[in-house]
Structures are given as C-alpha cells and as structure tokens.
C-alpha cells in the first residue's frame, strides 16, 4: 500500500508544480490600478491649459500657486510644478497609501528643484491645511462625497478661506440626461479598456453609485478598481452653495462644439445651454 501511495502522491505534486510553473500571471494581475487610473481618467496638461486660460481671462495673469484638493497620486500637482519654474503646489488627500504611491511614482520623477515646490499633505480638505494659494481645484467630482448642503457649504467655505484675496476656485460637474441612468461605457486606452459604470441612482436623494473597471485583451479584468458613492449635485445647487460660502461670483464654463457637434476643448462662461445626453462643466468661483 505504502509503495503505491507514495509515487501517486509524488506524481500529483509534480504535475501541480508544473501547472504552477506554467500559469503566467494575467494582465490584470500585472497591472497597477493607479497607473491605469492616471492613463484613463487624467490628462493634467489639458487641465492646466484650461486653468491658465480661465484664470488669465478672469485675473489677467497666469496663476503660480495651486492647491489640489483630493489630489490622490498628485499627478496634477506634479505636472503643475513642472509646468513653470516658479509654480508651487499643495496636494491634499486623506489616503496615505495613495499619497505614498504618488511620492514614489510621480514626485520621484520630478527634478529636485520642482520637488521642492511641491507639498503633499495627508489630511481632510475640510481642515484648510497649508498656505493660501491663487488657485484651488477639486477635479473628477471628488467633492461629491459631501452629501449634505451643510457639509458641502463647509467645504466651500474652507476653500474660500485658503485662497488669496483674488483667488479662484475651479471644479467640475457632470450631468445631462445620461447621468442619471444605469449604464456601462467602455473606452479603449493604451493596453486596456476603461469601463465607467453608473450602477445605481436614487432620484429621491440623488445618491449615485459608480465604479471604474478595467479589462484586458487576455480576458482578465479588474472589477471595481475604484468605487464612488456620491451625491449627484446640480449646477444651481453648487452655485447657490458657493455664493452662500462667500464667493463673490460663480460662473459656469461650458465646452464649445464644432460644426460636427464634437467638443472643441475650449470653454467659455455661459448662462443658457440646451441640455445634452452628457456634459461636463467647469464651475468657476471668484473669491
Ligand atoms: C476621485 S479621487 C481623485 C483623484 C485625482 N485628484 C483626480 O482628479 O482624478 C478622490 C480622492 O479623494 C480623496 N478624499 C476623499 N475624501 C477626502 C477628504 N475629505 N479629504 C481629502 N481627501 C479626500 C480620496 O482618498 C481619493 O484619493
């Protein structure tokens, strides 16, 4: 019995080892979700060009100091300090591991002189940490984690308080008829497919649950790489809360379209637009 058992066990163990040695990691296993996020969601050079355009049209100069609230990996802040030898940035985020990733992968690639002009702070954007800046931004709808008027107003009051006297706050909002339906949208990126899922929307509270998934050509996937539990605010609500928080003027900058109806990438302030399936605006508040 013993002699027949031993070889059988060995053979099994051998084939298991072989199978293990053969199993290559999937593309999903090899991927880094922050690299995927930066490559699919963020275009910091384009954001900075828009900030420069908006700020200089309002204030007649290019801003040199920027606070990036909800900075995540600080990709935008790093691009900011690299965009001009005098530019400074403060990035604020709650999440230590995400900031650490940004330090290792983004900050570390900056020349030492640019690194000195960047300060990353782990903290709550409600606490008003760091020096005053000319520009504060909160991109990719991150303020939508504040789900009550009181909390969002408090955040806007903090933003206003940490701006210099003629400072400007720029944030984004998305909407349109498709914003409140459950859907999955795919977009091809370099080496992977980005999937945006609007999983749930509650018309009573405007709570919106969204996920980002990533798919790869070997069939592997990262489901729910990022999940957002937001309140989908409206333009008038944001505007009212910013004014209540003490901002002097709040403009809505809408993207122009060419003759084929495609976005031009150029934004201008406006007071009337026809609704669309989906739109993304810059909400621009002057202190
Ligand atoms: C959607 S990501 C934004 C990443 C990047 N800034 C962008 O524009 O794509 C949201 C980030 O906000 C951070 N966050 C959420 N609540 C926060 C708070 N109260 N204070 C500071 N950071 C917060 C999260 O840790 C997360 O990194």
Image (tube, helix red, strand yellow):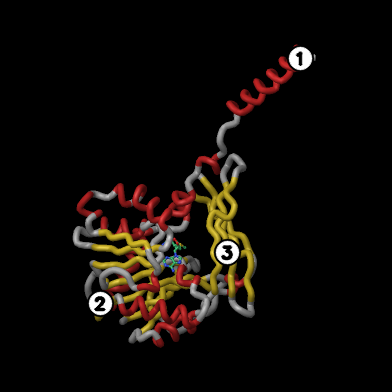
Above or below, 242 against 54 in this view is below
Q: Does the residue labelled 3 lie within 8 Å of ligand 1?
A: no
- The x and y percentages for residue 120 are 32, 60
Where, by quadrant of the figure, is residue 179 drawn?
A: bottom right
Q: Which residue lies furthest to the right in this view?
A: 1
In this rendered view, identify the residue nearer to me: 16 or 42.
Answer: 16
Image quarter for ligand 1: bottom left
Instruction: Identify residue for label 3.
Output: 210
**Residue 208 makes an appearance in the image:** yes
Does residue 256 appear in the picture of this structure? no
Q: Is residue 237 above or below residue 264?
A: below
- Residue holding disc 1: 2
Q: Is mark 2 on a helix, strand or loop?
A: strand
Q: Give how far across and how far down residue 12 sits, in percent.
A: 70, 22
At a point 26% along the width and 73% down the height, the residue shown is: 132
Q: Please give left or right for residue 81 compared with residue 231 in the image.
A: left
């Amino acid at each position: 019995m013993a002699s027949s058992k031993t070889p059988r066990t060995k053979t099994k163990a051998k084939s298991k080892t072989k199978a293990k040695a053969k199993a290559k990691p999937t593309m999903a296993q090899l991927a880094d979700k922050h690299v995927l996020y930066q490559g699919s969601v963020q275009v910091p050079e384009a954001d900075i060009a828009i900030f420069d355009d908006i700020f200089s049209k309002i204030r007649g100069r290019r801003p040199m100091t920027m606070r990036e609230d909800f900075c995540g990996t600080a990709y935008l802040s790093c691009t900011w300090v690299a965009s001009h030898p005098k530019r400074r940035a403060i990035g604020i985020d709650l999440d230590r591991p995400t900031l650490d990733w940004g330090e290792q992968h983004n900050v570390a690639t900056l020349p030492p002189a640019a690194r000195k002009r960047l300060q990353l702070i782990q903290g709550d954007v409600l606490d008003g940490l760091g020096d005053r800046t000319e520009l504060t931004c909160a991109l990719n709808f991150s303020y939508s984690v504040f789900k009550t008027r009181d909390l969002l107003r408090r955040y806007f009051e903090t933003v206003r308080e940490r701006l210099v006297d003629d400072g400007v706050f720029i944030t984004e909002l998305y909407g349109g008829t498709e914003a409140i339906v459950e859907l999955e949208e795919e977009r091809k990126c370099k080496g992977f497919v980005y999937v945006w899922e609007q999983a749930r929307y509650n018309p009573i509270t405007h709570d919106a649950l969204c996920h980002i998934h990533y798919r790869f050509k070997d069939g592997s996937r990262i489901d729910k790489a990022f999940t957002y539990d937001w309140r989908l605010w409206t333009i008038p609500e944001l505007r009212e809360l910013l004014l209540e928080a003490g901002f002097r003027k709040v403009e809505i900058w809408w993207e122009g379209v060419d003759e084929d109806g495609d976005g031009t990438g150029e934004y201008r302030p406006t007071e009337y637009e026809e609704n669309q399936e989906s739109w993304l605006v810059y909400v621009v508040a002057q202190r």
